[in-house]
Amino acid sequence: MESNQPPSVLPSKIMIPEILFIICSFLEIEDLIRARLSCKALADIGACYAFREIVFCLHPDDLDMLRYISLHSIASRNVHSLVYIGHTIGQPQKTFNEFRNYYATNRTGPAEARLDIDQLRRRYEKYKRIAAEEDKMLRQRQDFAILREAIPRFVCLREVTMSTDFWF
């Protein structure tokens, strides 16, 4: 008697974590980040490699990311290096004419050369918002507050690099 049912599926074999760990050690960071999305085991093992070096800037999203990683039970134990790029874009804040002149001499491609004055004004307004946000963060010392909170959680931290655009 023939059955119309599909053959039974063999139970899937679980890969040994040590083998996954070795595999993850050979992946580029972009591939590792994608692999972490595939299953919980790869997410946990990938966290051991994906966050060895954390590069962050003076930006609310970057500081939130640093806090989040410091609270992650696996990633926080595997951070070896922090690189803080504290360069600011708005200190001192440029006038529109200074911004326009800077923009004219520092374009990154031909598409930017075709911006009309309205587009340039919109970029200037965005620049002013970001500069004001940076200024507020610096006055409130939010970057140092996050570092003070996060660094003790990075128990394997070996190196901290801080870069700024001004002399101490």
Image: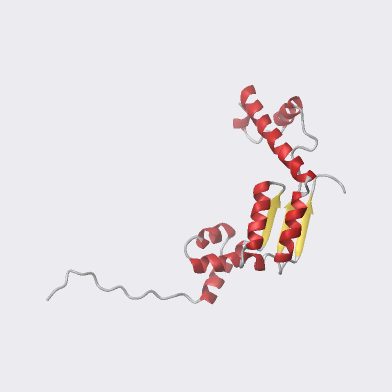
Q: Residue furthest left?
A: 1
Foreground: 100 or 106?
A: 100
Q: Residue furthest right?
A: 168
Relative to 139, does residue 128 appear above or below in the rendering?
above
Q: Is residue 84 visible?
A: yes
Foreground: 49 or 108?
A: 49
- Seen at 64% across and 54% down, the residue is 65
In the rendered image, the quadrant that contains the N terminus is bottom left
Say left or right for 9 vs 129: left
Q: Quadrant of residue 48?
A: bottom right
Say left or right for 3 vs 13: left
Q: Position of residue 98 (x, y in %)?
A: 76, 28
Say left or right for 12 vs 17: left
Q: Quadrant of residue 74?
A: bottom right
Q: Is residue 116 visible?
A: no
Q: Position of residue 122 (x, y in %)?
A: 63, 28
Q: Position of residue 142 (x, y in %)?
A: 75, 50
Q: Position of residue 45 (x, y in %)?
A: 56, 69
Q: Quadrant of residue 55?
A: bottom right
Say left or right for 79 vs 91: left
Relative to 99, does residue 62 appear above or below in the rendering?
below
- Seen at 65% across and 52% down, the residue is 64
Relative to 149, does residue 109 appear above or below in the rendering?
above
Foreground: 99 or 68?
A: 68
Q: Residue furthest front?
A: 140
Query: How many marks overall?
Result: 0
- Seen at 66% across and 50% down, the residue is 62
- Seen at 62% across and 31% down, the residue is 112
